[in-house]
Image: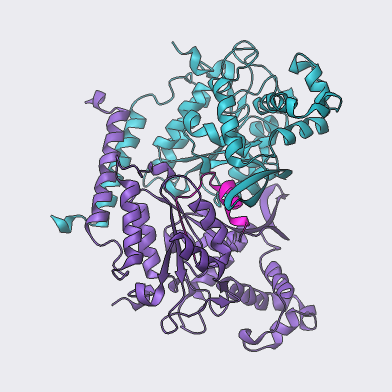
Chain colours: A cyan, B purple
Amino acid sequence: MKTSYTPKLITAALAAVLTFTTTVAQAADALPSWNEGKSKQSILDFVAKVTKPGSPDFVPPAERIATFDNDGTLWAEQPLYFQFRFALDRVKALAPQHPEWKTKPPFSKLLSTPKEENVAVSEQELMEIIIVAHSGITTEEFSQIVSDWIATAKHPKTGKLYAEMVYQPMLELLAYLRANGFKTFIVSGGGIEFMRPWTEKVYGIPPEQVIGSSGKLKFELRDGKPSLMKLPEIDFIDDKEGKPGAIQQHIGRRPIAAFGNSDGDLQMLQWTAAGSGARFCLYVHHTDAEREWKYDVSPMGRLEKGLAEASAKGWTVVDMKQDWKVVYPFEKK
Amino acid sequence: MKTSYTPKLITAALAAVLTFTTTVAQAADALPSWNEGKSKQSILDFVAKVTKPGSPDFVPPAERIATFDNDGTLWAEQPLYFQFRFALDRVKALAPQHPEWKTKPPFSKLLSTPKEENVAVSEQELMEIIIVAHSGITTEEFSQIVSDWIATAKHPKTGKLYAEMVYQPMLELLAYLRANGFKTFIVSGGGIEFMRPWTEKVYGIPPEQVIGSSGKLKFELRDGKPSLMKLPEIDFIDDKEGKPGAIQQHIGRRPIAAFGNSDGDLQMLQWTAAGSGARFCLYVHHTDAEREWKYDVSPMGRLEKGLAEASAKGWTVVDMKQDWKVVYPFEKK
């Protein structure tokens, strides 16, 4: 039977399994937390047409690239980006080693204000806090600190772990796209090293498919042992005009589907929409004051230009209140 | 039979196919162009131990990251990096639009010298030529120009297309690693946008697994149509100390195997070797003056420190002349 073990046969076997998987994904309701309606239907229609062999809109699996913003698109972002919360916690943890912070703003302001929400810092001061919280250690040390924080820190309003405040309908969407041969990427303004320690477990997205803002790294040999030090210098901000460039640098292909929730995602959606062939763009619109938050204009996410362009171009706009049966996984019965 | 279509079953089916593939890869000689000997055996031994379930050295598939330098490791690099040749051809093609180049060095030198090999330009002048050749157009226009060039331009010594001057034993090695669950990446000093148009076809490595040097990109709306312009500014040089940082930024995991041919790859190999668990580092040593080139110290690839460290640390050093039955695919009978 040795002659039957040809690469062609293996390819055929793999293809059979993939087809099988695809059939399964289409047979059951792959998006159970989505109410029936325009938004859900637009997703199903798009996936059906790009995956149907022989369809004029068919896209080969290798080109099925889908990019997702993170804050406000895959998990919540109110009342403060979760990464800012991490940075504040980190500065507090570092304070004993920095007695000078007691009198040095912005650290003094942060350390003397009991509720983080009430700290009055300028944008530049916040950046200073973030840089201090994200540098001066190796990438491996930082990864461990993030892992510890994400496993224990809780949201002040819900009392839940931050990783529990991901959107159940979007988890289903990620899995549905992957079951249909898509490769799912995060393209977020959040820190690349802040996301990677937990995105595989939480979203099923491996580190090499996470794109984000980054600080500079320095390769060093310490006693002959190589390490990558995180320097207190910003390398790249992955927001607005930066997102299409980051997609090109990291992926080198234009996505066929893109998902965001703010004007910071608009250029990513424009870049995606402008490719040839079938394209899909979706905005998550925060309309649910009860289960989540309701806002168009907030320091953590502004959706104005994007909403106008979505309307003009017929992109899908998810109304969280109407379209989602549940918001967070912990609401499921 | 609907109930039998569970995710567990699908996973089992996929696992069965993967095991099948792995068995096939081990059954036949997966590296037919490698002579039996220490180098080949070191590869087989490493792959066997990291893929054997229950082995103390077992590495889960998601962490089987292998990184390859390109110039001199996967394809030839003499007497001039092939990308430099591309840049020279591109400047010549652009010359009619730039009458001022007739008197402006370094362009004047290039345009007035019949044989490219004889052009005497400084390193800074060469960089100027490369920047001009790689900017001022969109990423999509550039990709097309590279595709056209790689399909037609020929090497002055062999008369072969450049994409034919890849190393047959390394193609087999790439396929062998992938058949054993590895994800293969290129980490090259070459231009990321110069490699991506052809690496999938030639090496089976998709664009999102290609890391290289890059220029800055600018997102623009031209008459409402988004484009990414390639600016005449270097963003990142993916060489030496830069390689481990680029691996961290793009992949976010440390490789367990790394392959290079010069001191420019040393930090990548050091970074790889210093991880915990089983690791594999390999240098391709250019020892074959007849079939390829023989050099340790050349402007296109210097292997001095790397050779010393390989010897001290027991890394595999491939002797091209001794270890490879054929160098290029076109030598195969």
Q: In which quarter of the image is the N terminus of chain A?
A: bottom left
Q: Quadrant of the C terminus of chain A?
A: top left
Q: Where is residue A198 in the image (x, y as percent from the top left)?
A: 53, 31
Left or right: where B294 falls relative to B267: left
- Measured from the top left, where is residue B193 in percent x and y? 59, 60
Q: Seen in the image, is B121 located left or right of residue B104?
A: left
Give the answer, above or below, for where B147 lies relative to A201: below
Q: Nearer the viewer, residue B131 or A66?
A: B131
Residue at 43% over, 73% down: B164
User: Is residue A95 or residue A117 the one in the foreground?
Assistant: A95
Q: In this view, does B30 lie above or below A236?
A: below
Above or below, A282 relative to A160: below
Q: Where is residue A188 in the image (x, y as percent from the top left)?
A: 62, 36
Indicate whether A329 appears above or below A90. above
Q: What stretch is highlighted in magenta?
A: B241-260
Q: Which residue is drawn at 37% across and 55% down?
A: B177
Q: Which of B329 and B107 is in front in this view?
A: B329
- Asked whether, in this view, residue B65 is left or right of residue A108, the answer is left
Q: Which residue is at a point 35% across and 25% down the rendered structure image?
A: A28
Q: Residue shown at 42%/58% (left/top)?
A: B204
Q: Which of A333 and B124 is in front in this view?
A: B124
Q: Can residue A151 be seen in this view?
A: yes
In terms of image quadrants, where is residue B98? bottom right
